[in-house]
Amino acid sequence: MAKEKDKVAVVGAIIDPGLCFNLLDASSLGFLEYGYDALLEDRGGVDFLPKNGDGKELWKRQLDCAVINMVHQIRSETQTDDWIKKNPGKPSLAPYDTVRGAFWEGGPIYDGARIEKKNHVQICVRNPNAIKGYFRPIAD
């Protein structure tokens, strides 16, 4: 019998990405670079940045997470009265509703492949209003 913590559930969701920080889009990647530079300055140098995993720990993405969070922080700061007063005429940056990224992991699916065994796309919903509905998928 499965323990309570071992039980899993699967739900489907209908998501409107809204304003999406799409990491497959060139303009978003430019903002990601800007976020990295801001994080680098904020932390005082590369030696003080978190590290991503390597080898079998590719799923450990502490640096990537910190950079993405910095992008959200920068956008949030442009919403403050102080920022608006210091930057007259500059538009504020709306917060992202979702973040979308693709991850290539697991090693080549066959010799010479550029397709890996565990490729996947992830969507992070930051604004709960982006979830338009949810459902339990039909069992196969």
Image (cartoon, helix red, strand yellow):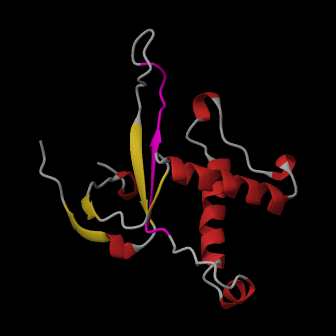
- Residue 92 in the image, given as x and y percentages of width and height: 58, 78
Q: Is residue 76 above or below residue 67?
A: below
Q: Is residue 23 visible?
A: yes
- Residue 8 in the image, given as x and y percentages of width and height: 32, 53
Q: How many marks?
A: 0
Q: Is residue 117 left or right of residue 67?
A: left
Q: Is residue 136 left or right of residue 98?
A: left
Q: Is residue 38 left or right of residue 28?
A: right
Q: Residue at x 53, y 54 (%)?
A: 28
Residue 39 included in the magenta stretch of the image? no
Q: Quadrant of the C terminus?
A: top left
Q: Residue at x 60, y 51 (%)?
A: 30
- Residue 20 in the image, given as x and y percentages of width and height: 43, 61
Give residue 91's quadrant in the image: bottom right
Residue 98 included in the magenta stretch of the image? yes
Q: Is residue 83 above or below residue 22?
A: below
* Residue closest to the far top: 111
Q: Is residue 62 visible?
A: no
In front of the other: 109 or 136: 109
Q: Residue at x 66, y 77 (%)?
A: 77
- Residue 48 in the image, given as x and y percentages of width and height: 84, 52
Q: Residue at x 39, y 39 (%)?
A: 120
* Residue closest to the far front: 89
- Residue interval drawn in magenta: 96-108
In front of the other: 59 or 91: 91
In front of the other: 12 or 15: 15
